[in-house]
Amino acid sequence: MITNRFLIAITKCSAFTLFALFFIQNLAYSQIDFPSNQGEVIHHKYYSLSYIEKAEQPEWVAYKLTRTMLKKVVNRNDEFHDDWHIESGSASYTDYENYDAGHLCPARQMQFDCTAMHETFFMSNMSPQVPEFNRRAWAILEKLERNMVWKRGELWIYVGPVLSDIDTTIGENKVAVPKKFYRILYDPTKDESLAFLMPNERILAPLESFVVSIDSIESITNIDFFNDFTVEHQKRLETNKTSSGWSFENPNLTYGYTAKARDCSTAEILNQQAKISINQASKAALMQLPNIGPEKAQAIMLRRPFKSTYDLLKVKGIGPATFEKLKSYIVL
């Protein structure tokens, strides 16, 4: 069910309302409840986030994961890119010195689709993580999440950094380095929840050691989860701090899909995305277009505003052949 609060949040994304209205229709969000937000809410195709400009990262990322989404259909491409949907601009990959750009919505969770996987590499989906944490305990928790989805059929996931008590920033954009990360799993079929709070450091203890109540996460993040649920319903879900009923077994499955993963083409990714505005898009956004590299993207920006998409033919380096390849992906 789409709530009134959801529609209001979308309206606030003024420059990208058309993008958001398209995503409303996506089944990935037909039944998920979004947390409260203090940032700019952005809706990508299969996940949403609330971006905190001061911290240059999201306070939360939310997505639904189903059993059919676990198929590894496409290869990971590791193409990190700025998120042109963020009005103030997202952090850049170059900001991440000595820290991993840690995915909040994991790339592996979205390898069933080219656009889904590609969009997990927006820098708005990243947070600075200690390498030994990102590549070990955090990765194991992501795998555990997949295994729980395989067993249960569907989960709603809420994940993010704890942005209070920040004393370290990195890069030119001063990206905040969190000391802790949380992950909340909700099974809408069984109406059960499980939450984790983990330090951003090398971890040797078992994951069960980091199970906490959702209430405890709310108290340190100032985020209200499940706020469309009744007070009684919230209390039952959010006070639970045990893992009873949740399997921590790691079957290491292929999730019923054995075909070889393939590479994605630029055309496949762009065909499924909302069209890019040549008058408003950032340089990073323009570079997603076929045959548009850094120099051509800069040349396009210097020629603005355009009165017609055909005016791109006046940009140095863009001839009829190039225009033919990108015309179906652009709007004014």
Image: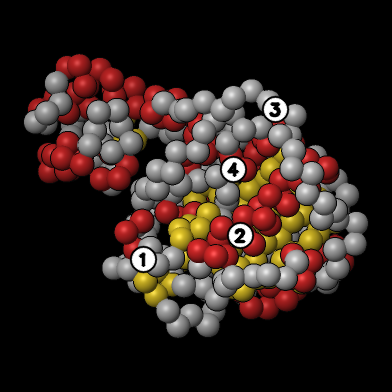
For disc 3, the marked residue is 257
Q: CA distance from mark 4 to mark 1?
A: 23 Å
Residue in the image at 29% along x and 24% along y: 326
In the depicted view, which residue is nearer to us: 195 or 58? 195
How far apart in space, not on screen, are marks 4 and 2 (Cα)?
Answer: 15 Å
Residue position marked by numbered label 4 in the rendering:
108
First-in-chain label (3 vs 2):
2
Residue projecting furthest to the right: 245
Residue 85 image position (x, y, % from top left):
40, 48
Identify the residue shown where x is 35% and y is 27%: 329
Is 62 placed above or below 266 here? below
Is tag 4's residue or tag 1's residue first in the polypeptide sequence?
A: 1
User: In front: 97, or 106?
Assistant: 97
Distance from disc 3 to disc 2, alpha carbons, whole Å, reads 25 Å
Q: Residues within 10 Å of mark 4 (few under 14, many from 20)?
A: many
Residue position for label 2:
136
Question: Residue 296: x, y in percent?
Answer: 17, 36
Q: Amino acid at mark 2?
A: Arg
Mark identifier at residue 97: 1
Q: Is residue 294 left or right of residue 231?
A: left
Instruction: Find residue 154 and report its image quarter.
Output: top right
